[in-house]
Amino acid sequence: MTEFVLQDSRGNTGDRLMFWGKNGSGYTTNLDAAQRYTKEEASSQNECRETDLPWPLAYLLEHHTLAVDCQYVKPDEIATQLDGTEPVYLYAARAWNGNDLLWQTADGRHSDNLAEAEAFEGSMGVSIGAVGRNGLRAIPKAIADGLARKVVASAKVNHKKALRGTGIMLAKRQKPSRSSIQNCGGCGRFVPSPVYTDCSHCGGSNAP
């Protein structure tokens, strides 16, 4: 049976898609922590709220990357574990994709995909990582690998292609009805009604 996950398409974290978490735990970028749905369940939720988009899980797994949340990396604690004997990754000290670290690659780039990070000899961690030389810090490879989670970058996936052959028909986005439109009392332009902020065109108040 094909499994689906639901994306909250109202916004991303960095460029990572946000999914409904398991057991009502809120939203998550971690694909492994996303709630699984049947086709019928996913379609039903999309009909109730059109911004909840169903994705076939298998498609997303084919296009995922690996990321490490900077909130779980404490430089002072990491520095005590850089003994020079274990391989390390290097990450940018002051750059992120959302909350996710950017990694030094073999060709000198910074990538948000841990799978592209170059593993350096442990001595590199002692000479660079603890000091933050060149804007880089080191973290033991084993620690970073243990913190890695599967995420999905918005630019790497195509929703229409993902749903092809699934039989899912997305709910159409509702257009505002004429009854929900009014003219601004100041400039006469159409504005949504009711309006609780000043008109974006002339600054006039249209509050009910």
Image: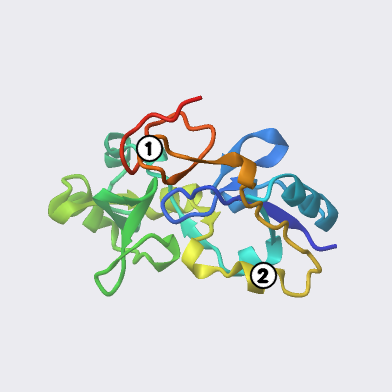
Discs 1, 2 touching: Cβ within 8 Å: no
Judge whether residue 183 can be spotted in this image: yes
Could you say where residue 11 lies in the image, as x and y percent from the top left?
A: 50, 48
* Residue plotted at (43% across, 50% down): 68
Q: In the visual, does 163 lie left or right of 66? A: right
- Camera-side residue: 30 or 195? 195
* Residue plotted at (14% across, 52% down): 133
Q: Alpha carbon of mark 1 to alpha carbon of mark 2: how far? A: 40 Å
- Camera-side residue: 202 or 159? 202
Q: In the visual, does 184 lie left or right of 4? A: left
Comparing marks 1 and 2, which lies closer to the viewer? 1
| Label drawn at residue 199 | 1
Residue 67 sits above or below residue 28 on the image: below
- Camera-side residue: 86 or 101? 101
**Callout 1 amino acid:** Cys
Could you say where residue 81 lies in the image, as x and y percent from the top left?
A: 32, 42
Q: Earlier in the sequence, mark 1 or mark 2?
A: 2
* Residue plotted at (34% across, 58% down): 87
Residue 112 sits above or below residue 76 on the image: below
**Quadrant that contains the N terminus:** bottom right
Could you say where residue 203 lies in the image, as x and y percent from the top left?
A: 31, 35
Q: Quadrant of residue 88?
A: bottom left
Tag 2, which secondary structure?
Answer: helix
Q: Residues within 10 Å of mark 2 (few under 14, many from 20)?
A: some
Could you say where residue 82 lies in the image, as x and y percent from the top left?
A: 29, 46
| Label drawn at residue 162 | 2
Residue 65 sits above or below residue 203 on the image: below
Tag 1, which secondary structure?
Answer: loop
Number of marks drawn = 2
**Callout 2 amino acid:** Ala
